[in-house]
């Protein structure tokens, strides 16, 4: 694991192997008026790590394969162009956790060909999705 303050970045300035995956999405920046507060939301709802304070707060997702930052001064994605989805164990539990932490439901859980999918608006106003395999039975 990196000793550096940035998730996925090694002390020598290199990138951890699980992040340096060619042709894969490995780093994203998420707009936030209050990066620290929004980072806390993602930590509470999705288990993401949070590093730093101020206008640029780094994160690592729960998989260890994606890193990024919550950044101030960028337009919030209220109407998604690119719509990121987070795979979760339970869409219903995630919606409950998300709304308890300040999110608004944009589209409640729906069936999409063997998947359960929903979209929310995070506390900054960005629209993101959650999905899971539909339970059998």
Image (cartoon, rainbow, N blue to C red):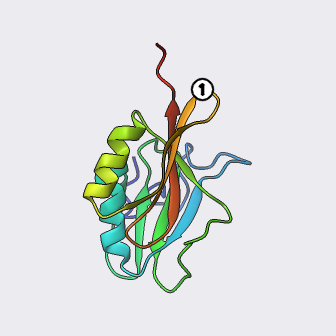
Give the residue at the far top of this rendering. Answer: 137
Identify residue for label 1: 114
* Residue 68 drawn above or below residue 8: below
39 or 53, which is in the foreground?
39
Q: Position of residue 59 (x, y in %)?
A: 42, 60
83 or 6, which is in the foreground?
83
Q: Position of residue 53 (x, y in %)?
A: 31, 76
16 or 120, which is in the foreground?
120
Q: Determine the residue positioned at 25% across, 56% down.
A: 100
> For this view, does 40 lie left or right of residue 117?
left
Q: Determine the residue positioned at 37% across, 69% down.
A: 123
> For this view, does 28 lie left or right of residue 70?
right
Decide if residue 47 is in sight here: no
Q: Position of residue 63 (x, y in %)?
A: 46, 41
* Residue 22 drawn above or below residue 55: above
Q: Determine the residue positioned at 43% across, 54% down.
A: 60
């Amino acid at each position: 694991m990196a000793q550096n303050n940035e998730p996925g970045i090694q002390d020598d300035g290199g990138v951890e192997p699980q992040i340096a995956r060619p042709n894969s999405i490995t780093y994203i920046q998420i707009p936030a008026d209050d990066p620290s507060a929004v980072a806390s939301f993602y930590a509470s709802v999705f288990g993401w790590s949070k590093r730093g304070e101020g206008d640029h707060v780094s994160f690592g997702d729960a998989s260890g394969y994606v890193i990024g930052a919550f950044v101030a001064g960028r337009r919030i994605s209220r109407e998604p162009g690119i719509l990121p989805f987070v795979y979760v164990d339970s869409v219903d539990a995630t919606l409950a956790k998300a709304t308890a932490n300040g999110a608004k439901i944009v589209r409640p859980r729906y069936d999409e060909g063997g998947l359960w999918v929903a979209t929310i608006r995070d506390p900054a106003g960005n629209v993101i999705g959650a999905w899971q395999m539909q339970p059998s039975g």
